[in-house]
Image (spheres, rainbow, N blue to C red):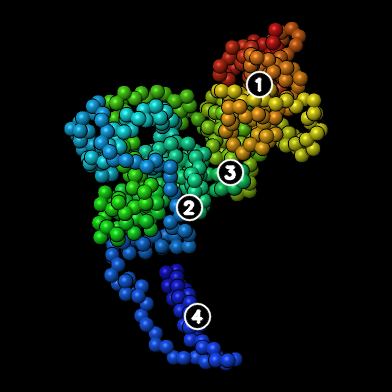
Amino acid sequence: MKFRYFNILFLFNFAICFSQVKDSLKVTDGNKETLKQIKTQKDSLLIQKVEDDLLAADFDQKWLEELYSNSLYDTIYNSVTELTFDEVEYPELSTELLKSRLTELSAKTPFNVEYNPGLESVIKSYLKHRRESLQKLINLSAFYFPMFERELDNHDLPLEIKYLAIVESALKPRAKSRVGATGLWQFMYTTGKMYGLDVSSYVDERSDPIKSTEAAAKYLSKLYEIFGDWDLALAAYNSGPGNVTKAIRRSGGYQNYWNIRHNLPRETAGYLPAFLATMYIFEYAEEHGFTKPKPEVAYFETDTIRVKQMVTLDQISEATGVEIEELQFLNPSYKLDIIPVVKGENYTLRLPRTVIGDFVTNEEHIYALAKAEFDKREKPMPQFFEADTKTTHRVRSGEFLGLIARKYSVRVSDIKKWNGLRSNNIKIGQRLTIYPRNSKASAIASTSKPTTSKAVSGTSKIYTVKSGDSLWSISQKFSGVSVQNIKDWNDISGSKLKPGMKLKVSKS
């Protein structure tokens, strides 16, 4: 393969040179063209190449062998803010204490966590000005870090690399940078494809926490294999290997990140300091007054199911009683909140362990209802929604699509479809077109006091739970009753049921 590459490269360069020489030899004399003999000269670029830094050239060659045909420099630039290294007054952390802690941290990690005034400035600036956002990240990390650590350990990588996802995406799986890098690890489209991440109209595995972490581990392993230094590997992950080798050349052959930092792109120059500052703060979070609460959903409290038929997160929410927002959080790679079924692909659904049994028990019935609904949606819209049922909702502070959908007894996917929304983001004051499923839901939603339940007329009905029943299967037995209705009317917070349990299935 390497021999073929050099042959092709030689022929390509020869053809270009010959074409240029031939064009330069043509001399027009009336209608005749004659060729003059011009003595060739050595290409000045070849002379310069002999003087190139051999170490940097070796790095370049290794990377070209890994990925020659792809763009190497339009890589995973992130949204790291421009860091300043001005002195920050923060008396709660003395310089001597910081030096001592950084020495301890450096001893247990392969990263060069050495004290310098610039790093001290970044750490103190974060502690002084970003406490609220850091606490939110610490809360989120309780869910993501266990899965990161598992994949990093599988690839024999330093576990501290988990902090890189904070610098890259602020732990937002659907984060997208200005240049198109996407997901927790901010993969560009071509790099993601190269490392096996599927990107289609329905799915973007760059947003899948486990699959993208596995891809990031492979990518970082290759970068470390090339550079032999974790600081340089991280810099290459951010700006591309080519920018790192150029910085090595411009600095006169230095290999320490801090010695070449001034020759790196501005974003990358602040990249490693931001990473090291984040690592320090997370490792000494409790010492700085941060709390580490238990997450609402822990990674080990969830499990996955291979999906056998196309189904939406709305349908799964109705079937299991899990809020649509929680399903979106657990399954961020499904761009349209739809899980497709594609030949040769295994798409999975992540659910809380407490509802896995409910889903599996009713799996075939759920798929049958989903299929019937998809078939129905092929008909023209006017057959379903009449003009007099249309209403306009003005988004208020604190509202989100899931809440609005429950208010009008419709689905999140319906609201997105009616209003041409490509994401779940809405703004205060935004007007949304809604087609309530029935007049009662419309009347309830239009009142000043919002509610998440449907009104069911008549006297209260009682249902006795049988073996194999779930909240969803019970709700299907009574017209106009949802899982949330049953939860509200019976003061149920979870989804566990016991045979013989008495449940209200209508509002008294």
Residue 57 in the image: x percent, y percent? 33, 64
Front-most of 356 and 223? 223
First of labels 3, 2 by sequence position: 2
Which of the two labelled residues, at mark 1 and mark 4, occupies the earlier sequence position? Answer: 4
Residues at circles 3 and 1 in contact by the CB criterion of under 8 Å: no
Distance in Å between CA atoms under marks 3 and 2: 16 Å
Tell me which residue sits at (58%, 91%) in the image: 30
Which mark, residue 203?
A: 3
Per the image, the residue denoted by label 2 is 191
Element on which disc 2 rests:
helix
Q: Amino acid at mark 3?
A: Val
Q: Is residue 385 left or right of residue 191?
A: right
Query: Is residue 187 rendered to the left or right of residue 88?
Result: right
Location of residue 35 with respect to 157 vertically, above or below: below
Please, what secondary structure does the residue beneath circle 3 have? loop
Q: Callout 1, which amino acid? A: Lys
Q: Position of residue 376 (x, y in %)?
A: 77, 35
Q: Which residue is mark 4?
A: 19
First in sequence: mark 2 vs mark 1: 2
- Residue under numbered circle 1: 407
Q: What's the amino acid at mark 4?
A: Ser
Asked if one can make out residue 399 in the rendered structure from this viewpoint, the answer is yes
- Which residue is rendered at x = 61% and y = 16% of the image? 487
Type of amino acid at the residue the image marks with label 2: Thr
| Structural crowding at the residue carrying mark 1, measured as other residues with C-alpha within 10 Å and reported as few (<14), some (14–19) or many (≥20) | many
Mark 3 nearby-residue class (10 Å; few <14, some 14–19, many ≥20): many
User: From mark 3 to mark 1, how far is it between C-alphas?
Assistant: 29 Å
Gap between marks 2 and 1 measured at Cα:
42 Å
Placement of the N terminus among the 4 image quadrants: bottom left
- At which x and y percent is residue 464? 67, 12
Q: CA distance from mark 2 to mark 4?
A: 34 Å
The local secondary structure at tag 1 comes to helix
